[in-house]
Amino acid sequence: MPLSQSQRASRTAQSEIRVMSLECEKVNGINLAQGVCDTPVPEVVRESAHRAIDEGVNSYTRAEGLPGIRRAIADKMHRFNGLECDPESEVIVHSGSTGAFYAACLALLNPGDEVILFEPYYGYHVNTLLAVDAVPVFVTLQAPNWRFQPEDLERVVTPRTRAILINSPANPSGKVFSLHEVQWIADFARSHDLFVFTDEIYEYFIYEGRHISLATLPGMRERTITISGYSKTFSITGWRIGYIVCDSKWSRAISYFHDLVYVCAPAPLQAGVAEGIMKLPQSFYEEISQEYLRKRDLLCSTLNEIGLIPSIPHGAYYVLADATILGGGTSREKSMRLLRETGVATVAGSAFYRGGGGDNLIRFCFAKREEELQEASRRLKTLRERVGRATVA
Ligand code: PLP
């Protein structure tokens, strides 16, 4: 038999976000495709990481992370999320929340287990499930409100359902799950005895509504795997510092798989993040959401003005916009057309749906410096002149 890659590898495809970032580079465009926040890293975080390197915090740490950052996370979970956890046995520091989710899937899912998630989805969630031979099952949310009903969950559950995943605030829809909705999910998970994976990476990026950690709902602590990290909050996407908070029943297996794949998260960077969590005042977090609210409003008003009607996000830093004015074809073609016409890169809506969905949507990311967003806005406004009257309303 000739050499070949695994069946698993044959099922994968390069992420649409990376594809569009490459296309954007070719034309020297403005990349509103990728969620790379290039706002400054807080000084205390940078300086503490430098100091940790200078002071010799450069070796492997325990798989679950340095004690200082685990204590800082447990304290933050109490203050911000309203969840009590033991830093020694219930907090695991990971290589980003991406690594955290992968380790949790390896530890808790068997091949063929079904996991319910909401569509439009974040591609890494689906691809991670596929990589561990789990089966994603979708509940589709409709623009512009992205609501669902308890019956939508009951319709897709089967005897093989093992977990449900929520991402609030969500990428790409910007949905912030309401108290009603998280209560429905909690009732559903309890009645069908499911794990809940909750990706809370955008917990500080809220413009409307409030963040509710699902693990705080009655009876949910034991079955909920809370995943988050500091990539977004501290603008350190390249540092790879994330974490899981879960019942001590599961943490040993999860940290085993984290050890196997990554050994540990980068040691001096764990130290930098720990200082940031302990020292940054409440106002730092309030300013983040105010700054991103301004950016959201700038982008959304431009999109409204040019007829790419946005679904206004309540959280996170992405906007899904209706791309009808960009003419026919797939959402990839619409996104490429926008890049050609204006030099602004976006992601095709189809990247967030299974076969066929999302073809009328494109996603913009507003985690950009103010000047860059202003320039993107200026370029987008030229769309009306560039695209023929036949398509631009
Ligand atoms: N989860 C969601 C929903 C995201 O949108 C992203 C990044 O875009 C991540 C996780 C990645 O986080 P990390 O850098 O902690 O791996």
Image (cartoon, helix red, strand yellow):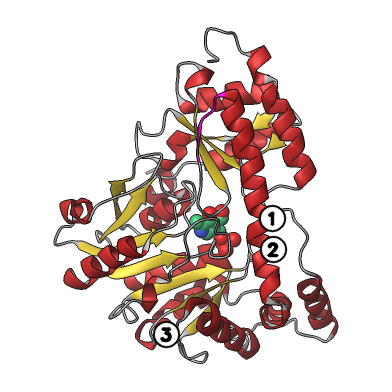
The residue lying toward the viewer, choosing from 362 and 195, is: 362
The residue lying toward the viewer, choosing from 192 and 255, is: 192
What is the x, y in percent for residue 84? 45, 87
Q: Is residue 119 above or below residue 310?
A: below
Q: Say if mark 2 contacts mark 1, CB within 8 Å.
A: yes
> Would residue 380 appear left or right of 391 to someone viewing this image?
right
What is the x, y in percent for residue 299? 64, 39
Name the quarter showing ligand 1: bottom right
As drawn, the residue found furthest toward the right would be 54
Q: Is residue 175 above or below residue 79?
A: above
Label 3 sits on residue: 252
Give the structural element (helix, strand or loop) at label 1: helix
Mark 3 → mark 2, Cα distance in angstroms: 36 Å
Residue type for callout 3: Arg
User: Which residue: 53% across, 74% down?
Assistant: 243
Quadrant in which the N terminus is drawn: top left
Label 1 sits on residue: 291
Give the structural element (helix, strand or loop) at label 2: helix
The residue lying toward the viewer, choosing from 170 and 117, is: 170
Q: Which mark is residue 287?
A: 2
> Would residue 323 appear left or right of 50 to someone viewing this image?
left
User: Which of disc 2 and disc 3 is earlier in sequence?
Assistant: 3
